[in-house]
Amino acid sequence: MEFMNRKPIIAGNWKLNKTIKEAIELVTLLKRLIQDTQSVDVVVCPVYTALSDVSEVLIESEIKLGAQDLYWEEKGAFTGEVSGSLLKDAGASYVIIGHSERRQFFHETHETVNKKTKAALKAGLIPIVCVGELLKEREAGQTFEVIQRQLEGAFVNFSKEEIQALVLAYEPVWAIGTGKVATPQQAQEVHAFIRKEIAKMFGAETATSLRIQYGGSVKADNIADLMREADIDGALVGGASLDANGFADIVRNAVSVTVK
Ligand code: PEP
């Protein structure tokens, strides 16, 4: 499979799961299971409270650490929030931004996604910016316009260089946690659309180099078919990332697609 020099990336979003002890157990096992995977970037995103301990376990490992959100202010009177520099301090190098659960349950808007993505880049983190349509939007034939609005909203006042420093995740909301994975063709159609939109906004070179993950009920038995599509550069994995063996199988199957 030719990835146009885009290194695929498999990231696990643990959501609100795992105590510190459970998180340490999971990554300790993952470290053992996931070796020789240089052709794919692997990231785990635990809850804030486990970041620092997980980062200790990941020293001298190829597996990278990510957070699930951040706040755009650096410091100050913002009770309950965590900034990009504090995530870096805890050992994170990635951060998920604009996940559909944040948009649905915590009222994230295009503007907050924009500010958070800017702040993440400023802190030296790699943002994983999520976009995706609701079931009712897909059924109403609005998928492309929803995605277009999300991209335009997220990337107001962005430079090419900033886009090149981030990862996008296409996550159809109807496929998240439902067991209803998009078909490789459905996902590819939207990934190609995203790349075309990014090309319009930031030029062909930026679009060609941008990594776009698919997310939504990814498992070991569907990752390879998804990644065989030309514009799918890996996956953001929710439920299946909570089990070390299942996640390691996803990574292994992703690696098998990258090795000719
Ligand atoms: C997610 O939360 O980003 C996700 C894709 O979840 P799941 O894999 O469980 O559908």
Image: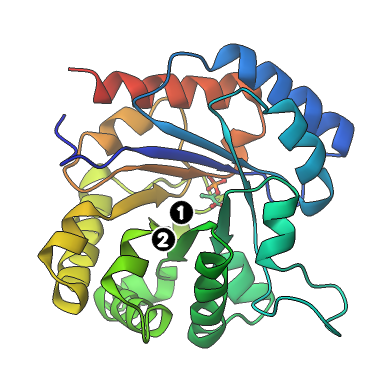
In the figure, 252 relative to 113: above or below? above
Task: Farthest residue to the left: give it.
Answer: 204
In the figure, 146 relative to 30: above or below? below
Residue occupied by mark 2: 172
Residue 127 image position (x, y, % from top left) = 49, 60
At 45% across and 25% down in the image, what residue appears?
A: 251
> The C terminus is located in which quarter?
top left
Residue 198 image position (x, y, % from top left) = 22, 70
Q: Specify few, some or many for label 2: CA neighbours under 10 Å numbering under 14, 14-19, or 20 or more.
A: many
**SS for callout 1:** helix
At 58% across and 48% down in the image, what residue appears?
A: 93
> Does the beta carbon at disc 2 come under 8 Å from ligand 1?
no
At 79% across and 72% down in the image, what residue appears?
A: 81
Given the image, on which type of amino acid does mark 1 rest? Ala
**SS for callout 2:** loop
Distance CA(mark 2)–CA(mark 1): 6 Å
Q: In this view, does 146 lie to the left or right of 91?
A: left
The label shown at residue 175 is 1
In the figure, 21 relative to 191: above or below? above
In the figure, 199 relative to 67: above or below? below
Q: Specify few, some or many for label 1: CA neighbours under 10 Å numbering under 14, 14-19, or 20 or more.
A: some
Residue 211 image position (x, y, % from top left) = 31, 51
**Callout 2 touching callout 1 (CB < 8 Å):** yes
Q: In this view, does 24 lie to the left or right of 85?
A: right
The label shown at residue 67 is none
At 46% across and 64% down in the image, what residue appears?
A: 129
Q: In this view, does 62 lie to the left or right of 167?
A: right
Asked if one can make out residue 124 in the rendered structure from this viewpoint, the answer is yes
Residue 237 image position (x, y, % from top left) = 52, 42
> Does the beta carbon at disc 1 come under 8 Å from ligand 1?
yes
Q: In which quarter of the image is residue 76?
A: bottom right
Given the image, on which type of amino acid does mark 2 rest? Pro
